[in-house]
Image (cartoon, rainbow, N blue to C red):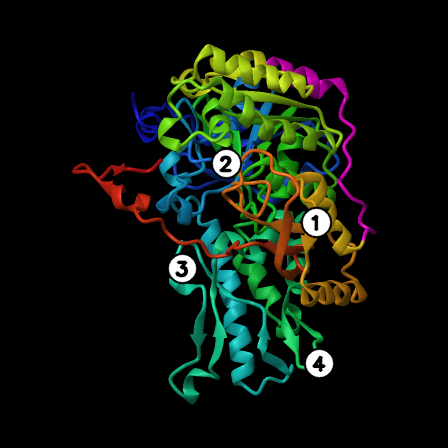
Amino acid sequence: MLSDIDIARAAEKLPPAEIGARIGIPPEALIPYGRDKAKLDPAFLATLNGRPEGRLILVTAVNPTPAGEGKTTTTVGLGDGLQRIGEKVAVCLREASLGPSFGMKGGAAGGGYAQVIPMEDMNLHFTGDFHAIGAAHNLLSAMIDNHIYWGNALGIDQRRVAWKRVVDMNDRALREVVLGLGGAPNGYPREGGFDITVASEVMACLCLAEDLADLEERLARIVIGFRSDRTPVYCRDLKADGAMAVLLKDAMQPNLVQTLEHTPAFVHGGPFANIAHGCNSVVATRAALRLADFVVTEAGFGADLGAEKFFDIKCRSAGLKPDAVVIVATVRAIKFHGGVAREDLGQEDVEAVRRGAANLVRHIENVRKFGVPAVVAINHFSSDTPQETQALIEAAERAGAEAYPCTHWADGSAGLLPLARRVAEIARSGEARFQPLYPAELPLEEKIATVARQIYGAADVNLPEQARSQLRRWEEEGYGHLPVCMAKTQYSFSADAGLRGAPTGFTLPVTEVRLSAGAGFVVVLCGEIRTMPGLPRHPAAETIRLDSEGNIQGLF
């Protein structure tokens, strides 16, 4: 069996102009990045304003497990499947972070015969967007400390600087650092730290902005810290927003690539699914909707994180109205949620499937709360037995959702044609009646409780008094209308990664709340969630190398 990287390397690539032509993009609207990537010219994007929009399909999944689910693989396969049945379609994905690529999660280009290419570029530096975001973020960091060094005219309380630095790599040693050591020439010593680039508010701003002007306004609204009287200090107070926008000018342009079957794919932006909203950019999604009849996109991690944020943050902010949802599950993942150890997942266990299906059922029920019809894609593994697959189908049907076994990893688009036809039918039906989970006017504390109880199944929320006071203060300052961005472990509905399946009756522990005024949401940290991941004991980087011919090996 060929590896993902071998399959991708052997694929025929069409020139970007031919890919763009499939959805009406003229060659002159593409800015080439090498032979197989291109960005969309902003002038062309402006001409799309006012066009009718196609139908939006979200691909989400059960809670991730070590067994794998294949959400991106299914997103790509569904796009190819819709194209195969004659539809005009585009795929919208996030860009990959170097941290997961060299850590344990791997890249973000799909897998098998349902991939986006060039796979190596996608999982490495791509078009440099992440580097631009990191540079813009760290420029603001440098200007904060420079302002303090030259007299601190804004009266920034160094104990209350909320803006960290970022690097696009998992590096736990940088979580908490001391800055400015070495005497007066190096500034004033203070505590600081690093987040991973995909957790940056600059990333979130870029992905939610409608255009460059909107991006600059969002950057200006970023709260970098507070004065001694607790009044906020904004990015615009430091006059950093203009220069940051300059660094982000090219990064704001969506990237056009292709799938193995030459379906147009917009790969742009990549915010963390639990720290930010976990979706690709509004600019890319909206461009795709105005160019294609169907747009297939994904949201990070399981539906409790990615899909909820897609609905409550991205769709609310951009006015998007999704038409259908596909929930990805695997027999292996469901058995894991049913209590089977990772090393035993290859053995048939129908009862474990029935137990673990509670996780899938809750996701189906949750998606329904947003008024969008859902179907289930069962991403097939060779170890799955017919009895296990049938048990999963029956569980989905009892929850009111159709389930379709899919073999797109091995067979490409041919492996999920029944799913593609059904999704197209549902999306065209007008059945969707999208609505966010909660109204904007609901108090912030109640928004947190609503997500915790209605999506996670929590009985209560443990909100420290300090956090509660902070939320009230932000409401008084005019931020009460913002949605909440819940940051918790992706492995469970709860904040405890060890609680599999569909736990209930637990208390959700909130540890910290953060204001992302530029992005337009309030981050709620729960449990032991971190904004800078660490590498595992044996990171993927150990097996990534160049062979004797200079080809990259080990990416996945």
Q: Distance from label 1 to label 3 (Cα)? A: 31 Å
Q: Which residues are magenta?
A: 420-442
Residue identifier under label 4 = 229
Badge 2, how many Cα within 10 Å: few under 14, some, many 20+? many
Residue type at mark 3 is Arg
Q: Distance from label 4 to label 1 (Cα)? A: 33 Å
Q: Is residue 410 left or right of residue 164?
A: left
Residue identifier under label 3 = 172
Spot occupied by residue 429 in the image (x, y as percentages of width and height) = 75, 17
Residue identifier under label 2 = 64
User: Which of disc 4 and disc 3 is earlier in sequence?
Assistant: 3
User: Which of disc 2 and disc 1 is earlier in sequence?
Assistant: 2
Badge 3, how many Cα within 10 Å: few under 14, some, many 20+? some
User: Which of disc 3 and disc 1 is earlier in sequence?
Assistant: 3
Q: Is residue 87 visible?
A: no
Q: Nearer the viewer, residue 448 or 417?
A: 448
Q: Distance from label 3 to label 4 (Cα)? A: 33 Å
Q: Is residue 418 visible?
A: yes
Residue type at mark 2 is Pro
Q: Secondary structure at mark 1?
A: strand
Spot occupied by residue 372 in the image (x, y as percentages of width and height) = 72, 28
